[in-house]
Image (cartoon, grey):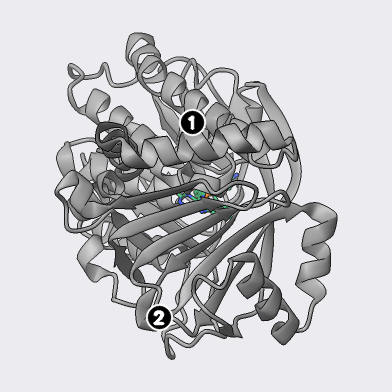
Amino acid sequence: MDKSFDLIVVGAGLVGCAFALDVVQRSNLKVALVECRPMATVDVRSPSISIGNQRVVALGMKSIDMLRRVGIFDKLTADQAHGYTSMRVWDESSNGELSFDASDVDQPLLGYMVDSQACTSILQEQAISFHKVRKASSGLTCFFDTEILSIELAAQRCQLFGSDQFHIKAPLVVAADGSRSWVRQQAKIQSSRLNYEQRGIVAKIRPKASHQNCAWQRFSKTGPVAMLPLHDNYCSIVWSLDSSHAEQLLELPDDEFCALLGQTADWKLGEIAEVSPRQSFPLISQQAQTYIAPGVALMGDAAHSIHPLAGQGANLGFKDADCLANLILSAKPNEHASLSLLAQYQKERRPDNRQTDLLMTLLNQGFKTSNRAVSAVRGLGMNWINQTTFIKKLLAEQAMGI
Ligand SMILES: Cc1cc2nc3c(=O)[nH]c(=O)nc-3n(C[C@H](O)[C@H](O)[C@H](O)COP(=O)(O)OP(=O)(O)OC[C@H]3O[C@@H](n4cnc5c(N)ncnc54)[C@H](O)[C@@H]3O)c2cc1C
């Protein structure tokens, strides 16, 4: 095996895999993609509520454009990607309400609800198909189920070592290995971390009333609950709650959970007829203090994790991938790992990611307050925005990533 590459991407999740494919398809660079787990698989027995991964990500049109560009979006089935046309947000403690429609921004859709595991699996299949046609001097080489045992990071000279004499090298390593990024730790990059002491309960539900292809979100003092529209009138829920409260809800029998959810959502979707097995995830905010070090760039959750209340985490990761890919593709030959290019990447992406993180933290805290004056002002603000066309348009464009 030729062990020299132009670029090594560590982590074949949504972000790392899309990034590696994008670079390979638009350049002559020789790229290695290293993933510690076996290839992701999808249970295709039926789109039933009770099986498979319950995690769905709301992706704006800019992220969908990237999935189209790397050639996988059309491979997702209707069960795996569902377009939504509107969004309704309302507040428990005031009469505040906000609604967005794709028509506000002259678009047919605001975005898609995408099955995260199916999308990862199809991206990885696409990566493998490029692996099969790689040439000696360019293309993609995939290493799944490969544990990196040690790493040497230096400007223009990085090396990865694993078992069975696995040894590869490249001028640049892109860390897309998730929020606990091992590469980030090896590069000695610190990160600031805020534990919300909350968990996000994730499940699929089937409400009795039509979801109308609308993403519903109610803010309450216990935390936000989102009901995101899927195929066949199923919805994906993300219910963020204080950890002890979440534990209680995870233990509830299905009928009691459905009743509580219906009530918490003000019966906007009527009674909840069915719920899948529930999963939960700890909610944190984490920001790497720098995205770059000699020979290394961080992207996606390796660089930043945010509260999921506005469904922006993966969208920000795709923006990182798009930005770094564009910078690499416009670099002069052999300069794709230069410090100035990496500095430009950090300059373009870090402020956006930090501002979004801060906004999520403020929204999460701001909607939890029981102060009646704050609630009243919040309600007035939401209703004012709702009636102010140009601000609504800006917010809708922000949500779509355009
Ligand atoms: C409850 C919840 C709901 C969410 N909803 C949304 C939403 O609606 N919209 C949205 O945009 N975002 C959402 N997010 C955020 C989104 O899920 C993440 O931002 C996104 O999945 C991050 O992708 P990633 O590829 O950066 O990292 P990951 O998905 O974590 O992928 C990292 C990959 O790296 C691999 N890896 C790890 N360590 C190593 C190693 N040492 N060597 C090799 N490989 C390694 C892992 O196996 C994995 O494949 C949500 C998050 C939560 C918790």
Near mark 1 (Cα within 10 A), the count class, few <14, some 14-19 or many ≥20, is some
Locate residue 239, reporting x and y percent: 63, 60
Near mark 2 (Cα within 10 A), the count class, few <14, some 14-19 or many ≥20, is some
Q: Is residue 285 visible?
A: no
Locate residue 341, reporting x and y percent: 32, 15
Q: Residue at left 37%, top 64%?
A: 214
Question: In screen coordinates, is 343 left or right of 227?
Answer: left
Q: Nearer the viewer, residue 303 or 106?
A: 106
Residue matched to label 1: 356
Amino acid identity at mark 2: Asn
Q: Residue at left 54%, top 78%?
A: 205
Does 292 appear above or below 108?
above
Amino acid identity at mark 1: Thr
Between disc 1 and disc 2, whose residue precedes? 2
Q: Residue at left 55%, top 83%?
A: 51
Foreground mark, 1 or 2, reads 2
Locate residue 151, reporting x and y percent: 59, 31
Q: Nearer the viewer, residue 100 or 188?
A: 100
Q: Give the SS element for disc 2.
A: helix
Locate residue 394, reporting x and y percent: 29, 34
Question: In screen coordinates, is 247 left or right of 294?
Answer: right
Q: Quadrant of residue 338?
A: top left
Number of numbered callouts drawn: 2
Q: Give the SS element for disc 1.
A: helix
Does 154 appear above or below 151?
above
Residue matched to label 2: 233
Q: Residue at left 59%, top 71%?
A: 203
Question: In screen coordinates, is 199 left or right of 154?
Answer: right
Instruction: Work out how far the residue at label 1 is from the one at label 2, CA to CA, in angstroms.
Output: 30 Å
Q: Quadrant of residue 352?
A: top left
